[in-house]
Image (cartoon, rainbow, N blue to C red):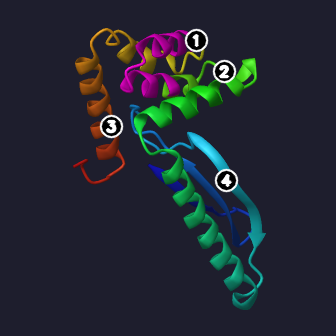
């Protein structure tokens, strides 16, 4: 799912921009910026005339970045490749958290269970371990793993008040 946030400020009128992919295969009640590459700094509102071109540019940037993400993530295999590469490029201190879980989920769903197991094993973040524990035991049964992933997605979509997947 693509998340577009026209980021407000508590101190001034105006907006910044964040665009990211959000993976729905997690049991949480909020959106997260899971694959985040686009942001624009906050621009303060001074007047309608000043801010109108800013708002237009931010909206155009959001649309371009959303389209770019759709072009990158054309299949679960591509998602797995991109997320695993991103995980390998992280500094060691940043590895072993949600990014490893997401890469592991994509790897497992694309049939690369050995790679998924290694990614799940690398998770050291105690906040992420329960999510890993829920799915890693299913790696030996691809049908059951897919069923659990579909269930996680359905529950998360429901919590976010999104339409059911077709």
Which residue lies at the image location 76% right of the left edge and 23% below the top edge? 91
Report if residue 121 lies within the magenta region.
yes
Disc 4 crowd, CA 10 A, few/some/many (<14, 14-19, 20+): some
> x, y (%) of residue 56?
63, 79
Q: Is 53 displayed left or right of 28 in the figure?
A: right
What is the C-alpha distance between the residues marked 2 and 3? 24 Å
In the rendered image, residue 2, in percent from the top left (x then y), is placed at: 48, 52
Q: Secondary structure at mark 3?
A: helix
Q: Earlier in the sequence, mark 1 or mark 2?
A: 2
Nearer mark to the viewer, of 3 and 4:
4
Circle number at residue 95: 2
Q: Secondary structure at mark 4?
A: strand
Q: Which mark is residue 122?
A: 1
Residue located beneath label 3 in the image: 153
Q: Of the numbered discs in the image, which one, if any, rests on residue 38?
A: 4
Q: Position of residue 146 (x, y in %)?
A: 28, 25
Query: Image quarter for residue 5?
Result: bottom right
Observer-nearest of 156 and 78: 78
How far apart are the two marked residues, 3 and 4, measured between alpha carbons?
24 Å
Q: Earlier in the sequence, mark 2 or mark 3?
A: 2
The residue depicted at 54 percent of the width and 51 percent of the height is 69
Of residues 36 and 162, the one drawn nearer to the viewer in this rendering: 36
Q: How many marks?
A: 4
Tell me which numbered mark, 4 or 2, is placed earlier along the sequence. 4
Q: Residues within 10 Å of mark 2 (few under 14, many from 20)?
A: some
Query: Are the residues at dot 1 and dot 2 in contact (C-beta closer than 8 Å)?
Result: yes
The magenta-colored residue range is 103-123
Earlier in the chain: of badge 3 and badge 1, it is 1
């Amino acid at each position: 799912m693509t998340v577009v946030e026209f980021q407000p400020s508590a101190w001034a009128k105006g907006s910044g921009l964040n665009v990211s992919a959000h993976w729905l295969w997690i049991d949480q009640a909020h959106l997260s910026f899971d694959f985040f590459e686009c942001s624009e700094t906050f621009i303060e509102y001074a007047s309608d005339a000043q801010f109108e071109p800013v708002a237009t540019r931010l909206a155009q940037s959001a649309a371009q970045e959303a389209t770019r993400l759709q072009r990158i993530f054309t299949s679960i295999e591509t998602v797995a490749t991109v997320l695993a590469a991103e995980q390998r490029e992280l500094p060691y201190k940043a590895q072993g958290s949600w990014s490893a879980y997401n890469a592991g989920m994509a790897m497992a769903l694309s049939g690369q269970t050995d790679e998924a197991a290694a990614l799940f094993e690398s998770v050291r973040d105690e906040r992420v371990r329960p999510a890993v524990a829920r799915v890693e035991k299913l790696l030996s049964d691809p049908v059951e793993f897919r069923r659990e992933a579909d269930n996680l997605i359905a529950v998360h979509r429901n919590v976010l008040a999104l339409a059911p997947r077709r």
